[in-house]
Image (cartoon, rainbow, N blue to C red):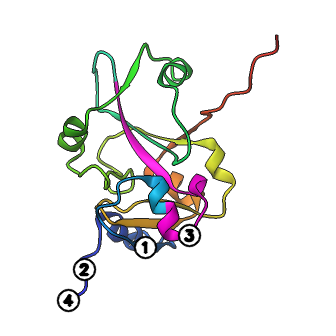
Amino acid sequence: MPASKPPAVRLLEARKVPHRLIRFDPAIRSAVDVAREAGVEPDRVLKTLVLESEPPERKPVLLMAPATIEVDLKQLAAALGMKRLRMARHADAERMTGLEIGGISALALAGKGFPALVDASVLHHATVFVSAGVRGADIELAPADLVAVTGAQPVDLFPAASPE
């Protein structure tokens, strides 16, 4: 019996958005390992981070960022005009989103009130990979479609250095 369709696939099919589903071992949790498994550059595979403002005031923010980068939360908070941001603990991220770590997806949560951000550096790629909403499945799609479906706001996670 074929595996059921992940939530994000159902959404993309309903909206007639071109995409490709890839499956891999659900034990893989790292976006870098997903890239290796898929045979693509790690900067095309996006991890979805669940970020909370401090103190928590609203739904958490979903940040889609390339697998290869470490996000400077202090810098990101300043850019967004927020006081502080912190990574949600795994158990909290799962409770707030209803999805498991390794399967948290802005696509699967589209329309559910979660503000979404995407690193602007990925917008130049022809396609990117994001979680399909379950462990062991990613979706390849155009970054413009990802932004359109999720309502993600592009953010510069590597702002230019200020002149000295």
Contact, mark 3 vs mark 1 (Cβ under 8 Å): no
Magenta range: 35-52
The tag earlier along the polypeptide, 2 or 3, is 2
| Tag 2 secondary structure | loop
Q: Mark 2 points at which residue?
A: 3
Q: Mark 4 points at which residue?
A: 1
Q: Which residue is drawn at 44% across and 51% down?
A: 150
Q: Name the residue under label 1.
A: 22
| Tag 1 secondary structure | strand
Mark 3 surroundings within 10 Å by alpha-carbon count, few (fewer than 14), some (14 through 19), many (20 or more): few
Q: Nearer the viewer, mark 2 or mark 3?
A: 3
The tag earlier along the polypeptide, 3 or 1, is 1
Q: Which residue is drawn at 27% across and 21% down?
A: 56
Q: Mark 3 points at which residue?
A: 39
Give the residue type that dot 1 points to. Ile
Relative to 42, residue 153 above or below: above
Query: Residue 4 at what x, y percent from top left?
Result: 24, 77
Contact, mark 4 vs mark 3 (Cβ under 8 Å): no
In three-dimensional space, the C-alpha distance between marks 1 and 4, rounded to whole angstroms, equals 17 Å
Give the residue type that dot 4 points to. Met
Camera-nearest residue between 114 and 21: 21
Camera-nearest residue between 12 and 133: 133
Q: Is residue 38 magenta?
A: yes
